[in-house]
Image (cartoon, rainbow, N blue to C red):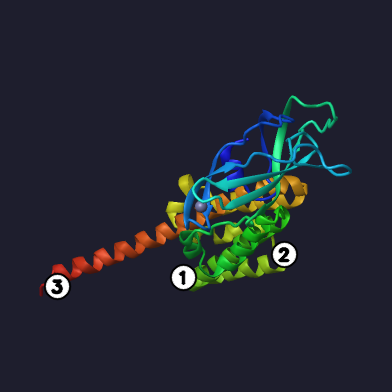
Amino acid sequence: MNAKFLETFPLGKKFAGQFPTTVEGYQCPAIHLWCEKCKREQTFNERKRARPGPVAGTALDFGSMSVGRTSFLVYLCAACGWPRSFLVEVGDITETHSPTYSAHAKWIRKLGQSPPWRMEISKEVEKALGDLAGLYRKGFECEGESFGIGALAYYRRIVEDFVLVLLEQKAKRLEGEELAAFQAMRAALDQNWTGSDAIDLAKSELPPEVRPGDANPLTLLYASLSEGLHVQSDEESVERAPEARELLEEFFLQMQRAKDSQAFASLVAKANRRRSGPPQE
Ligand SMILES: [Zn+2]
């Protein structure tokens, strides 16, 4: 087990690796998290497990971490003793649970924690998403509750809604014959809507900065989100959602950077015009 698992993983997301189990004295790594009492980030150390051994009739085990069992870990702030606790389940990837299996566990996941796990939403991402930030927040909450399919559904909605915005923008930009041709394609699309056709039609509205080598990141994002929604199990979707979210965040941050650099370019152009004074007759 590593510190990052306890510090940053949402509930349900598996951390795979080899670590000792059924070792009562196994010391979990120190972690660094916010202390409510000290009002700053502090080092937390695991409290010595006081009540070793499994709880009869349950999968709960206070003393050791072993495959198929659920353990309760208590951490204390090194400075003030303020507690943080984690309920973790240990499993074997091969699913060959047996009471005698004791060498190494293959994954561990959090089932609960106190204070509750909370995702920090980046202000930068929120700004880049604009009106779509509400959907993002809901997706984020789903991720926090290990509801991967729900998270992926919200993230896909963001892409779909964003494509509609791009299509509206395109209609406003075009004129004459180009506009007529676009409107015909748009009408055909409305008759027989598919996400990928809509993205193709909207592609020209993306600034070159977000289309490296003329690739369309929206196609990639949409395909990965749809795939996550259609073919994956709940567990897989929990694994998949953070990856999809990171791609989504990077896309919108890149869009924002392109917007900022356009705004900067027009400011520079304006300043230049002012410096060179009124045009010579
Ligand atoms: Zn403290």
Q: Which mark is residue 173?
A: 1
Q: Residue furthest right?
A: 57
Residue at the image point whose x is 62% and y is 56% from the top = 115
The kind of secondary structure element at disc 2 is loop
Above or below, 136 relative to 63: below
Image quarter of the N terminus: top right
Count residues near mark 2 (Cα–Cα under 10 Å), then give few for <14, some for 14-19, many for 20+: few
Is residue 276 found left or right of 26 in the rendered image? left
The kind of secondary structure element at disc 3 is loop
Q: Which mark is residue 279?
A: 3
Above or below, 69 relative to 123: above
- Which amino acid does the dot numbered 3 rest on? Pro
x and y percentages locating residue 110 in the rendered image = 69, 46
Above or below, 1 relative to 215: above
The kind of secondary structure element at disc 1 is helix
Q: Which mark is residue 192?
A: 2
- Which amino acid does the dot numbered 1 rest on? Arg
3D distance between C-alphas at marks 3 and 1: 29 Å
x and y percentages locating residue 219 in the rendered image = 60, 52
3D distance between C-alphas at marks 1 and 2: 24 Å
Q: Which mark is residue 115?
A: none
Of residues 264 and 253, the one nearer the viewer is 253
Q: Is residue 181 something one can see in this rendering?
A: no
x and y percentages locating residue 136 in the rendered image = 59, 62
